[in-house]
Structures are given as C-alpha cells and as structure tokens.
C-alpha cells in the first residue's frame, strides 16, 4: 500500500507537531489494538492523540494546514469545512497506516467512518452529563 505525496506530507506534519518518537509509539499502539477494536473505543484513543497534537501546535504554524485544522477544531469544534475535511483525511491516513478500516457498517448496514466518530469524541471530550 503506497500513500501519495500530499498524504505523506500530512503524516509528516503530524510527526513534526507531536514528535517522531511519539508518532511511532502511537502508530504502534494503533497497529496492535486498532484493527479489531470497536469504533466507540478506538475513537476515544485517536481523539486523545488529536488533543495531544493540538496542545503541541507551535505558535508559528502559518505554513501548516494540519496545525491550522487542529487549532480551528479546538476553537470551533462544531464547524465543518476545509479544516474539518483535513482532519477527516488525517484520521483516514492513520487508520490506513495502522491497517484499520476507517469505513465501516453498523449492524443495520448503515455506513459510517471511524474519522467521524473521532471528531465527535473530540468535541465531547469535556462533557460529563452527570455534572449538569
């Protein structure tokens, strides 16, 4: 499986943001637990990576589409658009690198993606309904 240049660039941007060792460790974790994991469980793990990456975005990130998308996600978590699509693509690439299927089907046969669930979990990260 080969990944073309722009997609490799996005993964390289992630490595630059979180660090090469951290990226490798996370990818190894996904390869180990991801392929046979349940969507609602692995989505939280990947959402945690996005939170970690967002916290490490450098202040001078103007030339990074990924860094911009992470900042926008944190500031406007429910907004959709180009930045949202950037993150959907990133999550799809991570799934592909970890030999996981991003596209899945519910028990009723409805299609969905891990990427959509990851972004949902990201936006709900601090929600604790029992505290309301």
Image: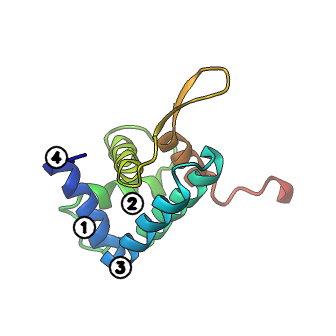
Which of these two is toward me, 107 or 54? 107
Q: Earlier along the polypeptide chain: callout 3 or callout 4?
A: 4
Q: What x and y, as percent, mark residue 111?
A: 53, 25
Query: Which residue is tagged 3?
Result: 21
Horizontally, is 83 left or right of 127 in the view? left
State yes or no: discs 1 and 2 in contact (Cβ < 8 Å): yes
Query: Which residue is tagged 4?
Result: 4
Query: Which residue is tagged 1?
Result: 61
Horizontally, is 20 left or right of 115 in the view? left
Residue 111 vertical placement versus 62 (above, below): above
Q: What x and y, as percent, mark residue 1?
A: 25, 46
Residue 18 vertical placement versus 74 (above, below): below
Of the numbered discs in the image, which one, if any, rests on residue 71?
2
- Report how far apart the C-alphas of labels 3 and 2 lie in the structure: 22 Å
| In this view, the mark in front (1 or 3) | 3
State yes or no: discs 4 and 1 in contact (Cβ < 8 Å): no
At x 86% / y 56%, what residue is drawn? 130
Crowd class of label 3 (few under 14; some 14 to 19; many from 20; radius 10 Å): few
- Way the structure is coloured: rainbow
Q: How many marks?
A: 4
Quadrant including the C terminus: bottom right
At x 66% / y 60%, what residue is drawn? 126
Q: Assign a secondary structure to mark 4.
A: loop
Q: Earlier along the polypeptide chain: callout 2 or callout 4?
A: 4
| In this view, the mark in front (3 or 2) | 3
């Amino acid at each position: 499986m080969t990944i073309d240049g722009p997609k490799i660039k996005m993964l390289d941007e992630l490595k630059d943001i979180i660090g090469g060792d951290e990226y490798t460790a996370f990818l190894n974790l996904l390869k180990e637990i991801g392929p046979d994991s349940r969507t609602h469980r692995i989505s939280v793990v990947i959402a945690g990576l996005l939170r970690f990456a967002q916290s490490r975005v450098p202040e001078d990130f103007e030339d990074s589409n990924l860094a911009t998308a992470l900042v926008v996600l944190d500031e406007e978590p429910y907004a959709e658009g180009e930045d949202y699509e950037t993150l959907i693509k990133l999550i799809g690439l991570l799934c592909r690198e970890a030999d996981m299927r991003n596209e899945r089907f519910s028990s009723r046969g409805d299609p969905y993606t891990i990427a959509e669930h990851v972004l949902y979990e990201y936006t709900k990260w601090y929600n604790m309904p029992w505290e309301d």
